[in-house]
Every structure is written in structure tokens, then in C-alpha cells.
């Protein structure tokens, strides 16, 4: 089974539940679903359409602040950013704009204009989105290309701990969650790209491109 992130040819069976088989790459440690379990685009979007993420929801804003706060602490004033995979309600982009930064938006379903993908940014955010990537290797290279030298990539995703925890993990039960990263995976990617990596709490990752 070819790893969809690093293209390594050797992956082992990691877990099986009632709906899907999961594999783990022996090189980058990504856990990913059997490609035959990937949903068609229309079914995937129907699930996303059910999400209710309002800009006025204070609980959701607190959730996003777990990424926003450490990111804002390192950004120069008036930085240019892109919210990649912003969804139908780009709440994080609004929060960062309120903090004085300029934001562009991209989402394959809700902001599909690819014009913002033709330039580079001081920072890129991607919250609760990378676990949905069908081709994470291609999307990772795109994210890297969007960052200026010295730029920061801010990610939010729940991370794999071990096989026993994975078996009980509610996060894997969302049918649109198809690849699962761990700290080891992010360290592998950081080594490949010469990035620095910081982990904040259990689900926030900041990676900085070399200047």
C-alpha cells in the first residue's frame, strides 16, 4: 500500500473497524484509510454542509484560539496570511484580521477560486483540514509553496498516539477523516523540508520555513 503522503511503498495494516481498513506508513508513520473507502466529492460535501461554525459562537472562537494565540505571538504586525481549507464560515480568518493581519481564503468547496494560490504568504493556517486530504503529499507540497521564506504554517489536527488508543478514538469515525498524523509524522516532514516544528497542546503544530 503506497503512502499517500511520502509515497513510501511499505505500509502495514494498522486497524480495522466495521467500515474501513487503516494502514500505517513505515517511513513517515502516517495512518491512512484504504483508498477504496474514500467518499465521492458530493457525499463528502454533504457532510461538510452539516457543520455549524458561526463567527458568533464563543466556544468555537476559544477552540480556534488554541492556534491563533501562539501564531499571533510570533507574527510581525500587518502580516499577509492565507486560511487554507477555511470552510463555509472563515472564523479564524476573521479573528486574525481583527488582530491586524491581511487574510486571503481558499477552500475546495466553499472558496474554490484558486487565485490566492498563485502567490506566497507570511503565514498559512489550516485548521481541522489536513485529516481530510485525499492526496496529502500533493497538498503538503502546495502548502510549502505558499509560504514565503521564513513563513509559518499553523496547523490544527488531532494526532495519533498509538494503536490501542486509535482503536477507541472517536476522531477516526468521521467518514471524511481519511489520514491521521502524529508528532513523528510532522518531525519527518520537518526534516525533509528543513523546517522547525513546535507542538502546542495536543492538536496545534507550528512549522517555520527556513529564511
Image (spheres, rainbow, N blue to C red):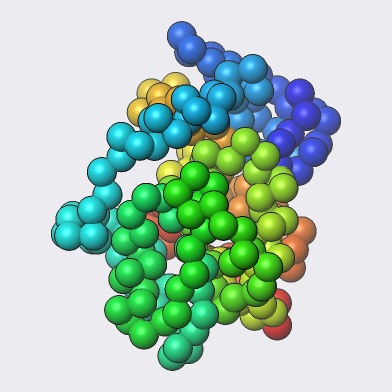
Where, quadrant-wise, is the C terminus in this rendering? bottom right
Could you say where residue 88 lies in the image, as x and y percent from the top left? 37, 50
Nearer to me, 14 or 117:
117
Q: Residue at x 45, y 49 (%)?
A: 110
Where, quadrant-wise, is the N terminus in this rendering? top right
Q: Residue at x 64, y 17 (%)?
A: 36
Q: Residue at x 56, y 25 (%)?
A: 40
Nearer to me, 113 or 92:
113
Nearer to me, 164 or 22:
22
Could you say where residue 37 lies in the image, as x and y percent from the top left? 58, 19
| Residue 91 visible in the current orientation | yes
For residue 61, what is the image quadrant?
bottom left
Could you say where residue 133 lies in the image, as x and y percent from the top left? 58, 41
Could you say where residue 9 lies in the image, as x and y percent from the top left? 83, 30
Q: Residue at x 76, y 43 (%)?
A: 6
In the image, taking residue 13 as reference, residue 3 lies left or right, namely right
Count of all numbered marks drawn on residues in the image: 0
In the image, taking residue 153 as reference, residue 210 lies left or right, namely right
For residue 71, what is the image quadrant?
bottom left
| Residue 187 visible in the current orientation | no
Judge whether 24 appears above or below 112 on screen: above
In the image, taking residue 141 as reference, residue 155 lies left or right, namely left
As drawn, the residue found furthest toward the top would be 18
Nearer to me, 123 or 183:
123
As drawn, the residue found furthest toward the bottom would be 77
Amino acid at each position: 500500500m503506497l503512502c499517500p503522503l511520502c509515497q513510501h511503498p511499505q505500509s502495514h495494516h494498522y486497524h480495522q473497524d466495521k467500515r474501513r481498513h487503516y494502514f500505517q506508513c513505515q517511513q513517515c508513520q502516517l495512518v491512512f484509510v484504504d483508498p477504496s473507502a474514500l467518499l465521492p466529492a458530493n457525499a463528502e460535501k454533504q457532510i461538510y454542509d452539516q457543520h455549524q461554525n458561526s463567527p458568533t459562537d464563543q466556544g468555537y472562537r476559544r477552540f480556534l484560539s488554541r492556534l491563533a494565540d501562539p501564531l499571533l505571538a510570533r507574527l510581525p504586525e500587518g502580516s499577509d496570511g492565507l486560511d487554507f481549507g477555511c470552510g463555509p464560515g472563515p472564523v479564524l480568518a476573521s479573528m486574525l484580521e481583527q488582530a491586524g493581519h491581511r487574510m486571503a481564503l481558499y477552500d475546495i468547496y466553499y472558496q474554490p477560486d484558486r487565485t490566492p494560490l498563485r502567490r506566497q504568504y507570511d503565514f498559512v493556517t489550516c485548521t481541522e483540514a489536513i485529516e481530510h486530504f485525499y492526496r496529502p503529499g500533493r497538498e503538503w507540497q502546495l502548502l510549502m509553496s505558499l509560504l514565503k521564506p521564513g513563513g509559518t504554517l499553523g496547523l490544527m489536527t488531532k494526532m495519533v498516539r498509538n494503536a490501542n488508543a486509535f482503536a477507541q478514538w472517536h476522531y477516526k469515525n468521521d467518514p471524511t477523516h481519511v489520514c491521521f498524523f502524529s508528532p513523528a509524522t510532522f518531525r519527518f516532514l520537518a526534516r525533509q523540508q528543513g523546517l522547525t516544528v513546535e507542538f502546542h497542546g495536543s492538536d496545534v503544530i507550528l512549522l517555520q520555513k527556513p529564511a
